[in-house]
Image: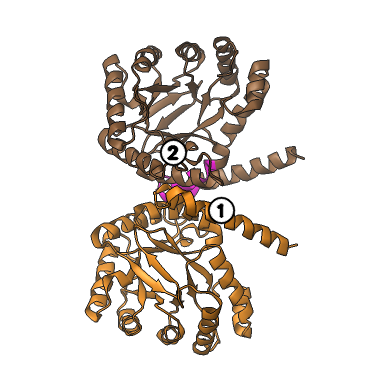
Chain colours: A brown, B orange
Amino acid sequence: MHTILKGKSKEVTIGIDRPFVMIGEKINPTGRKKLAAALAEGNLDYVRMLAESQVAWGAEVLDINVGVPGLDELAVVKKLVEMLASAVDVPFCLDSANPDVLAAGLAAAPGKPLVNSVSGEQKKLEMVLPLVKDRGAAVIGLTMDDNGIPKTSEERLAVAAKILERAGQLGIPTEDVIIDPLVLTVGSDSKAALVTLQTVKLLRKEFGVNINLGASNVSFGLPERPTINAAFLTLAIQNGATCAITDAARLGQTVKAVDLLMSRDDNSMRYLKYFRAAETLRAKEAEQAG
Amino acid sequence: MHTILKGKSKEVTIGIDRPFVMIGEKINPTGRKKLAAALAEGNLDYVRMLAESQVAWGAEVLDINVGVPGLDELAVVKKLVEMLASAVDVPFCLDSANPDVLAAGLAAAPGKPLVNSVSGEQKKLEMVLPLVKDRGAAVIGLTMDDNGIPKTSEERLAVAAKILERAGQLGIPTEDVIIDPLVLTVGSDSKAALVTLQTVKLLRKEFGVNINLGASNVSFGLPERPTINAAFLTLAIQNGATCAITDAARLGQTVKAVDLLMSRDDNSMRYLKYFRAAETLRAKEAEQAG
């Protein structure tokens, strides 16, 4: 099953028989003071730099979230998406809890964007899915509902089934729904990662859908987070995850290594290309840092 | 199924329900000029330092190979094993292609050592297994035979079955045979890792035995080898590998992260303990380096 996203001209295919797709996570002001300030001041140059840097590090889709308290998000998201569309040719993943902001972003985005996100919550299903359908977009479906995040894989699968069913009823094809089985931090619950990994496996088997993960929650509160995140993403890819909202600069080489090991990279071409690009980028960043 | 190894007093249990066991790879002069020179000169202090350092970095078993051309290996292995037994309290993994050297090492080793290795080759089976049986040791069985390393998982499984059968006929219990499904470099064959990972899965399912891997062959000839090795080991552990002959300093944090993610580390205790020990070791090494 292939989820096809489109930018201005670039098309990205997400699928189990394709190299793993990284969705750049950095255009999201939550926990990023500098970006929050830049958005509040209308300093779009900084956001453009974040976009270009993530694409250079191998992000094939960019998440865009403008959630800063007090900001006129509707105006900002329109302006920002238009600017980014002229700066980078990748599909966008519009990320907001506010359906109006999603609608404004979807209207401004080129090609076929992704929506982050719907869930099994009644209100979300009712407000977000029609936007996705009207725009002909794809959507990430989180396996949580009005009762929160289920503890077991089976219950998360049931939520996924509900989202897929409701999407289908509206005429959104299954291949345009990417399920995110969610992960809690393993620091507070030792079974947290295992439940998510098991859910990935079952989603693959039962529905054959594409599967997204946020790869950094899992390590919250623990030291050496990139090591845990890299290991978690590696395990999830083997179980059938096909994309992740992540830090491409940190996890790119691991993702390329896993593609290589899973025989999705003939003659190591993509791995070697990424390695050379990363070397050049690191040299440039070191030079800029003085 | 548990493989129990013993040092002077320390016991190490290898099993799918236990934390992953790292066997320190560094006491092997192949490709290590400084160690080869130290062994040739009888400079056992350097070897002792290598042993202590690996144990500090989390190696729970130490591989010992004294294969230097022209060296009286029989005399050296005896002396070295005795010295190491007084320096570190971990089980040893005696590593030689020469059965006489294995026999001398086994005689000198305390507790219950591991033998690296037998294979499905007729001559190996005949010469190595009786040594293992007589000493009450455990043994690593490589899935290759007189025709070389089989291309498919099924053929590697057949070699494993032959080794297990021959061991059983001699009275070596199945839990004392650790199967190594071997990995070739993914740089020259894009399916190399996948075949090994599939073999790990089948070995676990068919025989339930413990499974060892050398985790560095896979990346031979490629850049950023530690990233590939870490990803490969992570994938293999998820499929059922239970120990690896590896560089503990490089892969220790990844191994602890995988144990944590697979819920083999309640309250992240081992992960955090390893992180703190690694911090201390890095500080000490930086200080020594001046």
**Image spot of residue B65 (x, y percent):** 50, 77
In magenta stretch: residue A265: yes
In magenta stretch: residue A127: no
- From the viewer's perspective, tell me whether residue A265 is left or right of residue B158: right
The answer to whether residue A179 of the structure is visible from this angle is yes
**Image spot of residue A257 (x, y percent):** 48, 48
Q: List the residue tagged with mark 1.
A: B275
Tag 2, which chain?
A: A
* Majority secondary structure of magenta residues: helix
Q: Residues within 10 Å of mark 2 (few under 14, many from 20)?
A: many
Q: Residue at x 40, y 42 (%)?
A: A193
Marks counted in the figure total 2
Magenta segment, which residues?
Answer: A251-269
Disc 1 residue type (three-letter): Phe
Q: List the residue tagged with mark 2.
A: A20
Q: Residue at x 47, y 62 (%)?
A: B217
Residue in front for this viewpoint, B110 or A43: B110
Q: Quadrant of the N terminus of chain B?
A: bottom left
Disc 2 residue type (three-letter): Phe
Q: Residue at x 53, y 21 (%)?
A: A65
**Image spot of residue A162 (x, y percent):** 28, 24
The answer to whether residue B67 of the structure is visible from this angle is no
Q: Is residue A261 above or below residue B86?
A: above
**Image spot of residue B171 (x, y percent):** 24, 79
